[in-house]
Amino acid sequence: MLSLLFLIIVGLVLGLGIVHSWAQEFYKDKAVRFVVAYAAGGGYDTYTRLIARHISKHIPGQPSAIVENKTGAGGLIAVNFLYNQAKPDGLTIGNWNGMLGLQQHLGLSGVEYDAPKFESIGAPVRQRQTCLITNASGITSVEKWMASKKPVKLGGLGPGTTPSDMARVLSAALGLPMQLVEGYKGGADVRLALDSGELEGMCGLAWEIAKATWSKQLEYMTVVVQAMPKAHPDLPKVPLAINFAKSEEARQLIRVGLHDVSTVVQIYTAPPGTPKDRVQILRKAFQDTLKDPEFLAEAKKAQLELDPISAEEVAEIIAGFAKLPPALLGKLKDILLPKKK
């Protein structure tokens, strides 16, 4: 019995050695490409460029890493590319908003993918979504927003992105008056529009990202509401959206449309069909990077929060969107994919 156990252990060790040797040979002198679905300078881009600077040393063969921003259509251009065109060879990793996995089941136009078929790599953080509004608008609280006689002009990227989807869910669940202006390519573009006075606010901005990349805007904006189950430690006095819901339907919309998706709004995936052994290498490298002391030091300096999510949890949530009750999916479709007038 002991000899059999010994042989099994030896076999496993040798097998791991062969896999490591093969992987080292495959990745050596190659480049891993990160495809970011949103514009340079935004939160997705900031996290990805930090990860790209450190992940190479955790992949056998130490390939280089490059970042490409493939923007447009609220992330659809990049996700469709990752699903249909990117070579599934273990050299491409996409960074996109997993909310598009829900939008697929709502009938979003332009979807050319089946989200559960992506190979999940993980996510660096569970985002705590907020709404920020300029002080010049006169709206400094949810109560003032509810009582406003004119809609607040908010920036959005498009259906399937957090700024657009959070705004629509809050409008439907709480009756907040707003005018959603969509078509911006990323958070960086929205910031410029806020600086010029073109917009009055933005919802769906993760506090983790706001702290790191919105320091100038935070000087003239107020966080008026949080879309999460409990308050972020930095924002103990900022109210939770769900506490203003006046019906069970409104609470359910907030739980599913905001709370549940907050875990997968910044996911990393490999194209469908990527060999399983290479997927495992990338998953391990991703998680090891998020624990790397040099990475952590740089993240702290940049004020980027981390709350890593496993590939398995990401995959479970994405697959779960297809299992939502038809009535709830229908309601979410009415809210998140409004018919064009």
Image: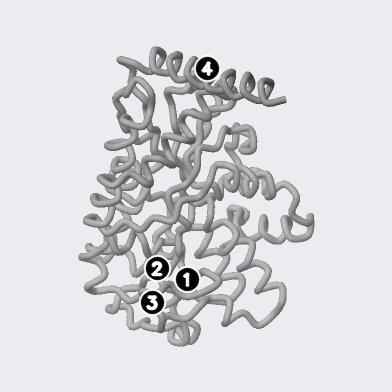
Sequence order check, earlier mark of 2 and 1 = 2
Residue 130 figure quarter = bottom left
Near mark 4 (Cα within 10 A), the count class, few <14, some 14-19 or many ≥20, is: few
Q: Classify 10 Å Cα crowding around label 3: few (below 14), some (14-19), many (20 and above).
A: few
Between the residue at mark 3 and the residue at mark 1, the CA separation in whole angstroms equals 23 Å
| Residue drawn at 32 percent across, 50 percent down | 42
Three-letter amino acid code at the position of disc 4: Leu
Report the amino acid beneath label 2.
Lys
**Which is closer to the viewer, label 3 or label 2?**
3
Q: For the residues marked 4 and 1, what is the alpha-carbon distance in whole angstroms?
A: 61 Å
Instruction: Give the image quarter of residue 95.
Output: top left
Q: Look at discs 3 and 1 and give the one toward the viewer.
A: 3
- Decide: few, some or many residues near mark 1? Use Cα within 10 Å; few <14, some 14-19, many ≥20: many
User: Residue, x 46% and y 35% (percent of image)?
Assistant: 284
Whole-percent x, y for residue 224 in the image: 41, 77
Residue type at numbered disc 1? Met
Pointer 3 or 4: first along the chain: 4
Q: Which quarter of the image is occupied by the C terminus?
A: bottom right
